[in-house]
Image: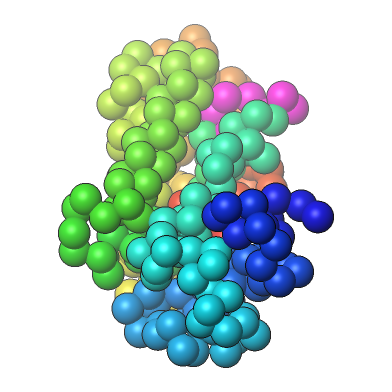
Amino acid sequence: MTELEKGPRGLRRGRGARERILGASRQLFRDQGINSTGLDQLCAVAQVSKRTFYQHFKGKDELIAEHLRRFDPDILPEVFDRADLTPRERLLAAFDIHGPLCPFIAAAVEIHDPDHPARVHAADYKKAFAARLTETAREAGATDPEQLGEQLALLLDGASARNRVLNTETFATAAAIAAVLIDNAIAASAVPPSAGGNPSTGTGPHARSGGELSRS
């Protein structure tokens, strides 16, 4: 029996029930939002009783926080930890995104209490993500890596929100803007000769938003 099959006091609470609850929350929160998802519906989709739900989570607030903690805990390692990409390429690879609204932005929009554990985690994630961008910008030779990291983080979040509102692809345009910001921030001697190519191609795997940056 794994730890995920145990309740908060280490007692067995139905094989896989916790994972089914988290899987249902991921699906429902993504498709219809946090506030529109009631506990009755969530339990029905997860195929658990309310009694079983409360054996794993104190309430919906705790579930929401855990739901967010499951998204991208290591901050896009498939992009930022790639040794086969240059730092500039890793920065651009963060924009190779195809997915729904960043779950951290979505949670912050729906949950008004800034002290809610999900809001706190969302803020911590966004700060950590910007820090990874800043670290990579420093490796790339940016003259002001903190400024570039914040600019790219803002650009990514804006692209994610605009993608959702307009239901259209926005990340290719964001990647082109990012390439200009990056190359303006990097000293001329640090820009590779091939940097003038198409910034939205050859930058690595499809990254995730937020999450899933986008996790499905």
Whether residue 165 is situated above or below residue 113 in the rendered picture = below
In the figure, residue 159 lies in which quadrant? bottom left
**Is 177 displayed left or right of 175 in the figure?**
left
Q: Nearer the viewer, residue 15 or 88?
A: 15
Residue at x 65%, y 85% (from the top left corner) = 47
In the image, residue 24 lies at what x, y percent? 58, 76
List the single residue furthest toward the right.
Answer: 1
Check the image and report above or below for 22 versus 121.
below
Query: Magenta segment: does it hold 85?
Result: yes
Numbered disc total: 0
Residue at the image position 46 percent from the left and 89 percent from the top: 40
The residue nearer to you, when weighing 21 against 186, is 21
Residue 150, given in percent of the width and then of the height, sits at 31, 34
Q: How is the image coloured?
A: rainbow
> On the picture, is 111 further left or further right than 19?
left
Residue 137 falls inside the magenta stretch: no
Q: Position of residue 79 (x, y in %)?
A: 62, 38
- Which residue of the protein is positioned furthest toward the top in this rendering? 189
Quadrant where the image shows the C terminus:
bottom right
Q: Is residue 5 visible?
A: yes
Query: Where in the figure is residue 75, as x and y percent of width and height?
Result: 54, 39
Query: What residue is shown at x 60% (from left), y 59% (from top)?
Result: 7
In the image, what residue occupies the spot 45% across and 16% down? 138
Regarding residue 198, the answer to whether it shows in the image is no
The front one of 189 and 132 is: 132
Residue at the extreme left: 113
Instruction: Tell me where the magenta segment starts and ends, as one range.
Output: 83-90
Q: Quadrant of the N terminus?
A: bottom right
